[in-house]
Image (cartoon, rainbow, N blue to C red):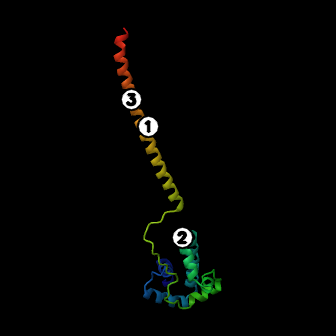
Amino acid sequence: MKNYQYLTSGILEAHLLGLATEKEQEELKHLLATDADVLNQLAELETEMEAYFLKNSVPPPPEIREKIELRISETEIKKWEEPTREEFTQKSTESRSNEPHYVNVEVNNTHIQVHKHWKTAFIAVFILSKVFLILGLYYYFKADSLAQEVERLKAATQQTAPLGR
C-alpha cells in the first residue's frame, strides 16, 4: 500500500524537481534502498521528465550559452551526458549531495532584449512612417496651393467675363 501511495502521490515528481521536503526525501531514500519497483519507477519517471524537458526546452541566448560553456569543465559535461541504466541505478542508490545541479548565470543587463529581426522590422516601419508623413504633408500643401490657384483663376475669370459680353 505504501509503495502505491508513493507512486501516485507525486512525491517522486517532487523529489525529481527538488521540491520534496527533507522528511519526504529521507522516507524516499529508505524506500529506494529496499524496494526495486519504486527505484525502477523513479528511473522511468526521470527519463520521461528529461525527455519532456528536452523536447520543450528553449535555447539560451548565444552569449549566455558561451558563458556557461566556459564555466563548465569537460568532466562536468561528461557527467551530464546520457548515463547507462546501470550507472543510473547506481547513482540513484547513492546519497545525493545537497549541491545544486545547475550553473548560476549572472546577467547585468536589465533591459528587455528583442530579436534582431524585430529590431530591423521596427526600424523599417519607423522610416516608412516618416516617409509617408513627409509625402502626406507634401500632397496636402500641394492640394492646398492648387485649391488656392483654382480660386484665384475663378475670381480672375469672373472679373474678366462681364467685360467680354
Identify the disc placed on residue 139.
1
Which residue is at 45% across, 75% downward?
Answer: 108
Chain-order first, disc 2 or disc 1:
2
| C-alpha distance separating marks 3 and 1 | 12 Å
Looking at this view, is 56 or 148 the one in front?
Answer: 148
Q: Residues within 10 Å of mark 1 (few under 14, many from 20)?
A: few
Q: Which residue is mark 3?
A: 147
Q: Is residue 127 visible?
A: yes
Q: Position of residue 15 (x, y in %)?
A: 49, 82
Q: Residues within 10 Å of mark 2 (few under 14, many from 20)?
A: few
Whether 136 is drawn above or below 68: the answer is above
Q: Secondary structure at mark 1?
A: helix
Identify the disc placed on residue 61.
2
- To which quarter of the image does residue 140 belong? top left
The reply to whether the C-beta atoms of the residues labelled 3 and 1 are less than 8 Å apart is no
Q: Is residue 45 visible?
A: no
Amino acid residing under circle 1: Tyr
Tell me: 79 left or right of 4: right
Which residue is at 57% across, 90% downward?
Answer: 93
Amino acid residing under circle 3: Ala
Mark 3 vs mark 2: in front = 3
